[in-house]
Image: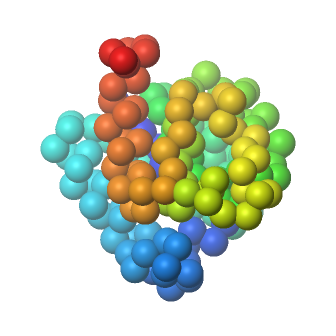
Amino acid sequence: MKILFINGPNLNMLGKREKSTYGNSSWKEIEEELHKEAQKLNVEVLFFQSNYEGKIIERIHEAEKENVDFLIINAGAYTHTSIAIRDAVSSVQIPIIEVHMSNIFKRESFRHISFLSDIAQGIICGMGKLSYKLALHAALELKDGTPDM
């Protein structure tokens, strides 16, 4: 199984910005933890981060050509603004899990709106860096369809 993690704008600043909201870990540290977890699970993981909407869209398109099985996406602020990223996700036949480190529903009201939630298999938010690890495990459970509820 191949899973692509996509991070949007400002997530390259993890560990430096708003530590009370996003924690102390850098994206590089989180990525290393996810690599270790993926090895245990016998899963291939790929990582991409961009502050540019068009590059994120292009990476989503490339993912289908690479036979990516699942997208785990934290589109950052683009979650709340980008119909173009939504359209890119809709244009590929790859299921997604939407991830946010912070609980977007405890933040400003504009963050309560997501252009991805209704096309995602699920949403994980508010668990800090653990949100990514939970999404990795969820993708494995979802790969063959709906998990046993």
Residue 5 seen in the current view:
yes
Residue at the left extreme, as displayed: 40
Which image quarter is the N terminus in?
A: top left
The colour scheme used here is rainbow
Left or right: 60 in relation to 130: right
Q: Nearer the viewer, residue 94 or 112?
A: 112
Residue in the picture at 53% in, 33% down: 122
Left or right: 126 in relation to 34: right
Residue at the bottom extreme, as displayed: 16
Which image quarter is the C terminus in?
A: top left
Residue in the picture at 72% in, 51% down: 112
Seen in the picture, residue 37 relative to 77 is either above or below; the reply is above
Residue 137 point in image, percent of width and height: 32, 37
Seen in the picture, residue 32 relative to 46 is either above or below; the reply is below
Left or right: 53 in relation to 18: right
Residue 24 point in image, percent of width and height: 40, 79
Residue in the picture at 62% in, 60% down: 106
Q: Nearer the viewer, residue 104 or 38?
A: 104
Residue in the picture at 21% in, 55% down: 36
Residue at the front extreme, as displayed: 106
Q: Nearer the viewer, residue 12 or 17?
A: 17
Residue 58 point in image, percent of width and height: 70, 46
Residue 7 seen in the current view:
no
Left or right: 54 in relation to 123: right
